[in-house]
Structures are given as structure tokens and as C-alpha cells.
Amino acid sequence: MKQIIFLISAPRSGSTILQKLLVTSEKINTTAEPWWLLPIIQYKSDQGYESYNKRIASKAIHDFDKYFKKQTGSSLNNEIVNMVQKVYALLAPDCGYFLDKTPRYYLIVEELRKLFPHAKFIFLTRNPLEILSSKLTAHNDTFHAYYKYKMDLYQSVKKISDSLHNQHDNIFQLDYNDLICSETNCVVQLNSFLNLDDIDAQNVSSIEVDGVMGDPKAMIHNEGIRSKKSFWYQKVNSPIKYLIFKKIFSATPDDYFHFSGITKSMVKNDFNKISWWAYLNFWQGTIDTIALIRSYLTKNRK
């Protein structure tokens, strides 16, 4: 029987490395990041920035769904599920899985769980302060794109945390630091969860994933599982960065840190490790302020 694996995480949580680890198995196929279920699953939504009027479109689609049910006894959702399962079945190995790794599926995770109750869900969590640190590294230590990825620091935490409170046998939860520091144990657990025996961390460096999306550094050949833990507080080098990191920390619920294998008090103690110079570095603070203003003014540009 062919099945689906959904890998749910925020961007910059190590999902590409986990994806490469999973496809060391001959029973799992994947591509970089499909993304296609975001518009498909949200087809009834009245939110968005499409060129047509989403509110009117939502009203029309709901009306059409009623008509479809009346005429066929089925629903548009059922037809979408059948279509998705057919597409992924064409891509999955015999008696294996197709892995859909699209980080922003956290936006539709509850819809996916309802529509695909027999799929496997792997949740990859990471301390949001580490995510921001990784985001800054990817953007030359500036906030120039902050308002374009801000939701990954807030919405992902809430939606993933809410979903993990509703546990089922088809859910496996893993934290980023466990992945990079205890990959042997992770492999054992993943093999057990997926009823496989050939996921192998030693083969990650030989994996290449087709597609243009995802972390370009992690996608390259010979990139293995990183064994060095990152320290988010080392990125805090100005009063503005301190305020942003502190705001994210305050907004993150205790239980999400629990899912990440730590406690909020442990993270709070890490603030004491920030260099004293960060609080006085007003030059860098000015640069960060300008970057934030620019990011806000250009947030809706493509």
C-alpha cells in the first residue's frame, strides 16, 4: 500500500536535512518542496492577495460545493483527496511513501490531518529564537526581510503547538537539536514509526533532492547532518535585535518549548549569555532599525 508522509515544520528548522535522511530509504520518494496543497486546500478561503476578489470567489466556491453535493452526493473535498492520493501514488515506490516536505504546510496542518487521516505526519520543532538566528544568517545578519518571514516565528509556533496537543498514532514529533545531536536514536525511531528498516544517517551525504525550493546549502551533494549546535544569543549584537528576540520569546508558549525538549526558563537563562556590548551597540541598532523599516515598507512586494 502506498502512503503519504507530511513533514510539518517552520522554515529554517532542519526540514531539508530530515528530508534527505528519510529518503535514504528506498521506500520513500520526494521532491524539494511541492507547495501545491497550500492553494488547493485553501480554495474556499476568503483571505489572500490574488488578483481576483477572494471574498466573492469564496462565496461562489461554497455555493458550487453545495451544488456538487446535491448532484453527486460527494464533495469537492473528497474529490481533492482522491486527486492528491492519486498523484502521490504515482510518485511513491511500491509499498512505500511519497514525502511532501513543505514547511508552510503548518498553515494548513489541521486541514491536512482531517482530509488525510491515514497519512503519516512528522512534526519537526525548533526553538523559534534559533529559527530567527538561522534566518538572520541566511540574510547577512540583517532584518531586511523580517516582515516577509515574521509569520514563521509566530504562526508556526501556535499552529504546530496546537496540533501536537492532539496526538494520534500517525504523528511523530522530533526536535531539531535531537536530529543533529542524536541522529542514531532518531533513525531508530523513524524506522519504527514508518515500519521501515533502511533509513541510514550514514548515507545522507549521498542524497540529492530534485527541485529548486528548500535550503540550498542543505540540498547540495555531500551535505550531511550537522553535529554542531547553534547558539541563538550569539546573533544578538544590538538593542534592536535584543528587543525582537525578547518579543518572540515572550510570545512563545511554554508548551512549545516543551515540545522542543527545553523549558522556557532554560531559554530565559540564555538571555544572560548575550554580550554586554549588544545593549550599547547603537550603531548596529540604527542599521537594524533602518532594515526593519525597509522590510515593513516592502513586505508585500514580490
Image (tube, helix red, strand yellow):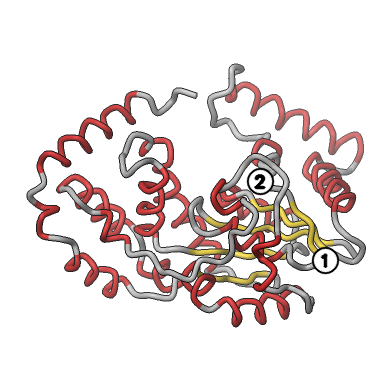
Q: Residues within 10 Å of mark 2 (few under 14, many from 20)?
A: some
Q: Residue at x 61, y 54 (%)?
A: 109
| 200 or 147, nearer to the observer | 200
Position of 118 relative to 286 (above/below): below
| 284 or 254, nearer to the observer | 284
Q: Quadrant of residue 43?
A: top right
Mark 1 residue type: Glu
| 7 or 41, nearer to the observer | 7
Q: Which mark is residue 33?
A: 2
Question: Image check: 192 left or right of 91?
Answer: left
- How many marks do you count on the picture? 2
Q: Which mark is residue 34?
A: none
Q: Quadrant of the N terminus?
A: bottom right
Q: Quadrant of residue 99?
A: bottom right
Q: Residue at x 26, y 29 (%)?
A: 293
Which residue appears farthest toward the left when viewing the image?
Answer: 280
Mark 2 residue type: Glu
Residue 292 placement (x, y as % from top left)? 27, 34
Q: Residue at x 57, y 54 (%)?
A: 218
Residue 291 placement (x, y as % from top left)? 27, 33
Secondary structure type for disc 1: loop
| 183 or 298, nearer to the observer | 183
Secondary structure type for disc 2: loop
Question: Image check: 168 left or right of 162?
Answer: right
Residue 164 placement (x, y as % from top left)? 54, 67
Q: Residue at x 31, y 39 (%)?
A: 143
Q: Earlier in the sequence, mark 1 or mark 2?
A: 1
Residue 296 placement (x, y as % from top left)? 32, 29
Which residue appears farthest toward the front when viewing the image?
Answer: 222
* Residue where numbered disc 1 is placed: 26
Q: Residues within 10 Å of mark 1 (few under 14, many from 20)?
A: some
